[in-house]
Structures are given as C-alpha cells and as structure tokens.
Amino acid sequence: MAPPSIEYSVTDFSGIERIRSLWNELNRHHNTRARAFRDVYSRMTFDDRKAHFATIAGAGRFRIDLASDPAGGICVGYCVSSVNPAGDAEIESVFVAPAFRSRGVGTALMERVLAWLSAQNPGRIQVWVADGNEEAFAFYRKFRFYPRMTVLEQKIP
C-alpha cells in the first residue's frame, strides 16, 4: 500500500485546537506507559496544556507544525516547538497518529521544526521524553538528540 499523500503546514497558537484530539491520544499513550507518575497524565487535560502553551507563546517564539491527510481531511500529526527569551529551544510535544507511523510523517515534521529552530540560533535545543516512553529515544537519536542526564523527581503523596 502506498503511503498517503500528506500536506504540511504551520500555524501559531491560534491553531492550537487542531491538535486537541492528537494531544489527547499522546496523553493516553503516556498514561499507559508511565510508571510512578501515571496520576499526572490521568489528571492532565488538553486545556491545561493549552494554557501552558499560551504562556510560552506569549513569552517567546512558538510554532505548531501540522501534518494533514487531505483525503480524510484530518490532522494526523503535529510538532509544537518554542524558543524562550533566553534563546533556548524546546520541542514541546510531538505525535503522529498510529495509522500514519513508519511512513516518514514524524521525520518530516522533525526536519521542518529543526530547520526553523536552527534559523532561530538557539543556545540549545531540547526535547523531554516522559518516563516509560524511552522507546522514543531511537526516533530522536536520528536527529542527534541523546540523553544528557536523568532527572529523578520525588513522588509527593
């Protein structure tokens, strides 16, 4: 089966609602795999994350790259990225719908985002990977992201 034709576009915070259903899938993914902090994901809502993104968008440079299936008229992947006022960049959130994985969609999103971030001359570019989602390391390694340190957080009752 040939991969579907995918269209890529960019939006700012005003287009945040386009990723709501995909972000909810990502949150369920993290909730399923989380070990100690499953409760964080079970309590987190898209509106919480949206508020966080609004703060970031208001303080620095913010971008959402979208991958859409024109045949189905749906968004099938996204990558949210930002550059803070200090000049540090972060890939905030990435997700590709399971039916569209292993077809180059995630790679295309990352290449687009990294080109934009590089043009911003960041001091560094980071991506945080949730505990339990270490399988994502192999994907990020393709783009020269490597574990630098492990942060342990005390679980407070």
Image: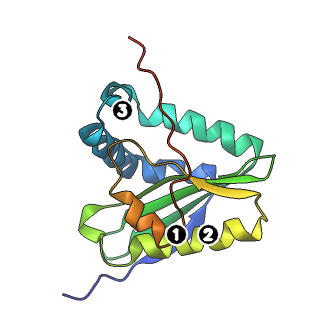
> Which residue is nearer to you in this view: 124 or 42?
124
Residue 47 position within the rendered picture, expressed as x and y whole percent measured from the top left: 48, 33
Which residue is depicted at the point 77% across and 57% down?
123
- Regarding mark 1 in the picture, which secondary structure is present there? helix
- Regarding mark 2 in the picture, which secondary structure is present there? helix
Q: Residue furthest bottom?
A: 2
Q: Amino acid at mark 3?
A: Tyr
Q: For the N terminus, which image quadrant? A: bottom left
Q: Is residue 148 above or below residue 11?
A: above
Q: In terms of sequence position, does the residue under pointer 3 or pointer 1 come before the other?
A: 3
Which residue is depicted at the point 57% across and 33% down?
51
> Which mark is on residue 41?
3
Q: Residue furthest left?
A: 1
* Residue at the disc numbered 1: 110
Residue 139 position within the rendered picture, expressed as x and y whole percent measured from the top left: 40, 67
- Regarding mark 3 in the picture, which secondary structure is present there? helix
* Residue at the disc numbered 2: 114
Q: Residue furthest front?
A: 149
Q: Amino acid at mark 2?
A: Leu
Q: Can you tell which quarter of the image residue 80 is in?
A: bottom right
Structural distance between the alpha carbons of marks 3 and 1: 24 Å
Q: Residues within 10 Å of mark 2 (few under 14, many from 20)?
A: some
Q: Are marks 1 and 2 in contact (CB under 8 Å)?
A: yes
Which residue is depicted at the point 34% across and 49% down?
133
Q: Can you tell which quarter of the image residue 73 is in?
A: bottom left
